Image (tube, grey):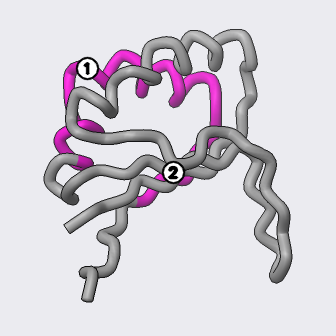
Amino acid sequence: MTAYVIADIEVLEPIEYEEYKKLAGPTPAQFGGRYIVRGAPTHVIEGEWSPKRFVILEFPSLEQAKAWYESEAYSRAKAIRHRAARSNVIMVEGVTPS
Protein backbone atom coordinates (compact mmCIF):
# COMPACT_ATOMS: atom_id res chain seq x y z
CA MET A 1 0.00 0.00 0.00
CA THR A 2 1.29 3.47 -0.88
CA ALA A 3 2.80 5.43 2.00
CA TYR A 4 3.62 9.09 2.49
CA VAL A 5 6.28 10.93 4.44
CA ILE A 6 5.00 14.36 5.42
CA ALA A 7 7.29 17.01 6.85
CA ASP A 8 6.78 20.52 8.18
CA ILE A 9 10.22 22.11 8.35
CA GLU A 10 11.26 25.42 9.85
CA VAL A 11 14.62 26.32 8.34
CA LEU A 12 16.92 28.00 10.90
CA GLU A 13 20.22 27.91 8.97
CA PRO A 14 19.43 28.52 5.26
CA ILE A 15 22.96 28.00 3.94
CA GLU A 16 23.37 24.69 5.73
CA TYR A 17 19.86 23.68 4.68
CA GLU A 18 20.82 24.10 1.01
CA GLU A 19 23.45 21.38 1.56
CA TYR A 20 20.74 19.17 3.05
CA LYS A 21 18.57 19.65 -0.05
CA LYS A 22 21.44 18.69 -2.37
CA LEU A 23 22.21 15.52 -0.42
CA ALA A 24 18.62 14.50 0.33
CA GLY A 25 17.13 15.28 -3.08
CA PRO A 26 18.04 12.10 -4.97
CA THR A 27 17.72 9.64 -2.07
CA PRO A 28 13.96 8.83 -2.14
CA ALA A 29 14.22 7.47 -5.71
CA GLN A 30 16.65 4.81 -4.45
CA PHE A 31 13.72 3.39 -2.44
CA GLY A 32 11.00 3.85 -5.04
CA GLY A 33 9.98 7.24 -3.64
CA ARG A 34 9.20 10.55 -5.26
CA TYR A 35 8.44 14.09 -4.18
CA ILE A 36 4.78 15.14 -4.36
CA VAL A 37 5.27 18.53 -2.65
CA ARG A 38 8.65 20.11 -2.03
CA GLY A 39 8.64 23.50 -0.33
CA ALA A 40 5.78 25.09 -2.25
CA PRO A 41 3.86 27.84 -0.44
CA THR A 42 0.95 26.63 1.70
CA HIS A 43 -2.45 28.29 1.91
CA VAL A 44 -4.19 27.87 5.26
CA ILE A 45 -7.92 27.57 4.70
CA GLU A 46 -8.95 26.34 8.15
CA GLY A 47 -7.40 26.30 11.60
CA GLU A 48 -4.18 27.81 12.87
CA TRP A 49 -1.53 25.43 11.53
CA SER A 50 0.89 27.36 9.34
CA PRO A 51 3.60 25.09 7.96
CA LYS A 52 6.92 26.78 7.19
CA ARG A 53 8.34 24.47 4.49
CA PHE A 54 6.03 21.62 3.60
CA VAL A 55 7.25 18.40 1.96
CA ILE A 56 5.37 15.26 0.95
CA LEU A 57 7.10 12.16 -0.41
CA GLU A 58 5.30 9.13 -1.83
CA PHE A 59 6.65 5.57 -1.53
CA PRO A 60 5.24 2.27 -2.79
CA SER A 61 4.96 0.98 0.80
CA LEU A 62 5.47 1.95 4.42
CA GLU A 63 8.39 -0.49 4.54
CA GLN A 64 10.15 1.35 1.69
CA ALA A 65 9.50 4.73 3.34
CA LYS A 66 11.02 3.45 6.59
CA ALA A 67 13.96 1.92 4.73
CA TRP A 68 14.65 5.29 3.09
CA TYR A 69 14.38 7.23 6.36
CA GLU A 70 16.72 4.82 8.16
CA SER A 71 19.13 4.36 5.23
CA GLU A 72 22.78 5.20 5.03
CA ALA A 73 21.95 7.13 1.85
CA TYR A 74 19.76 9.56 3.80
CA SER A 75 21.59 9.56 7.17
CA ARG A 76 24.15 12.28 6.33
CA ALA A 77 21.46 14.58 4.92
CA LYS A 78 19.21 13.92 7.93
CA ALA A 79 22.01 14.92 10.33
CA ILE A 80 22.39 18.23 8.49
CA ARG A 81 18.64 18.84 8.62
CA HIS A 82 18.63 18.21 12.36
CA ARG A 83 21.26 20.96 12.76
CA ALA A 84 19.78 23.41 10.25
CA ALA A 85 16.05 23.15 10.94
CA ARG A 86 13.25 22.19 13.29
CA SER A 87 11.13 19.44 11.79
CA ASN A 88 7.91 17.57 12.36
CA VAL A 89 7.89 14.42 10.22
CA ILE A 90 5.29 11.65 10.00
CA MET A 91 4.71 8.56 7.88
CA VAL A 92 1.23 7.42 6.93
CA GLU A 93 -0.25 4.75 4.68
CA GLY A 94 -2.61 5.81 1.92
CA VAL A 95 -6.04 4.39 1.27
CA THR A 96 -6.50 1.15 -0.60
CA PRO A 97 -8.01 1.79 -4.03
CA SER A 98 -11.52 0.38 -4.36
Residue 65 drawn above or below residue 39: below
Mark 2–mark 1 distance (CA, rounded to whole Å): 18 Å
Rendered image quadrant of residue 46: bottom right
Q: Provide the secondary structure element on which disc 1 rests.
A: helix
Residue located 55% across and 20% down the image: 21
Q: Quadrant of residue 98?
A: bottom left
Q: Picture quarter containing residue 92? A: bottom left
Circle nearer the N terminus (2, 1): 2
SS at badge 2: strand
Q: Residue at x 51, y 51 (%)?
A: 56
Give the magenta part as a residue range: 65-90
Circles 2 and 1, Cβ within 8 Å, touching? The answer is no
* Mark drawn on residue 73: 1
> Furthest residue to the front?
98
Q: Residue at x 30, y 61 (%)?
A: 3
Q: Nearer the viewer, residue 54 or 34?
A: 34
The residue to which callout 2 is attached is 56
* 1 to 19, vertically: above or below: below
Which is more toward the observer, 75 or 35? Answer: 35
Relative placement, left or right, of 98 versus 41 is: left
Rendered location of residue 18, percent (x, y): 64, 14
Instruction: Name the mark nearer the viewer: 2 or 1.
Output: 2
The image position of residue 69, as x and y in percent, is 29, 39
Rendered view: 15 above or below 39: above
Q: Residues within 10 Å of mark 1 (few under 14, many from 20)?
A: some
